[in-house]
Amino acid sequence: MIATELAQQAAAVLQQATLAAPEPKGINTEGIVTFFASNIAPILLAVLGVIFIGRASRGEISKVLTSSAIAIVGLAFIAGAATLFFVGDYLIDLIFN
């Protein structure tokens, strides 16, 4: 009798535990993008700046200008991609709402 009551109580506790389990959460992609934008990107830009200053001090001005232009074009492509993301989101909201 004690064993059956104990088994019933254990089953009830297990059932409540499975019902109260939280649903799995997704990946916080906005947090990841914010982390990269606020922490990683400035470090990479600082490294590029140090490389450019080092080259310029050795007299390799043409290489510095070429590298700077490539970096600026790359940043423009990244900004353009982000802009297209927001424009696409706006167009989808405009069409489907």
Image (cartoon, grey):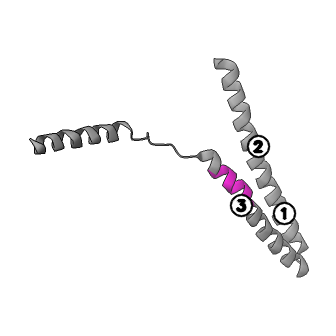
Q: Residue at x 82, y 74 (%)?
A: 50
Q: Is residue 2 visible?
A: yes
Q: Is residue 59 visible?
A: no
- The amino acid type of the residue labelled 2 equals Gly
Residue matched to label 2 = 80
Q: Nearer the viewer, residue 4 or 20?
A: 4
Earlier residue among tags 3 and 1: 3
Q: Secondary structure at mark 1?
A: helix
Q: Is residue 72 above or below residue 47?
A: above
- The location of residue 37, given as percent across then percent down, is 72, 54
The span shown in magenta is: 32-41
Q: Nearer the viewer, mark 3 or mark 1?
A: 3
- The location of residue 95, given as percent across then percent down, is 67, 19
Q: Is residue 64 above or below residue 29?
A: below
- State the separation of the CA atoms marked 3 and 2: 21 Å
**Could you classify mark 3 by the number of other residues whose Cα lies within 10 Å: few (under 14), some (14-19), or many (20 or more)?**
few
Earlier residue among tags 3 and 2: 3
- The amino acid type of the residue labelled 3 equals Asn
Q: Residue at x 77, y 62 (%)?
A: 42
Residue matched to label 3 = 39
- The location of residue 20, given as percent across then percent down, is 39, 38
Q: Residue at x 17, y 44 (%)?
A: 6
**Could you classify mark 1 by the number of other residues whose Cα lies within 10 Å: few (under 14), some (14-19), or many (20 or more)?**
some
Q: Quadrant of the N terminus?
A: top left
- The amino acid type of the residue labelled 1 equals Ser
The reply to whether dot 3 and dot 2 touch (C-beta < 8 Å) is no
Q: Nearer the viewer, mark 3 or mark 2?
A: 3
Quarter of the view holding residue 61: bottom right
Residue matched to label 1 = 68
15 to the left or right of 73: left
Q: Which disc number belongs to residue 8?
A: none
Q: Secondary structure at mark 2?
A: helix
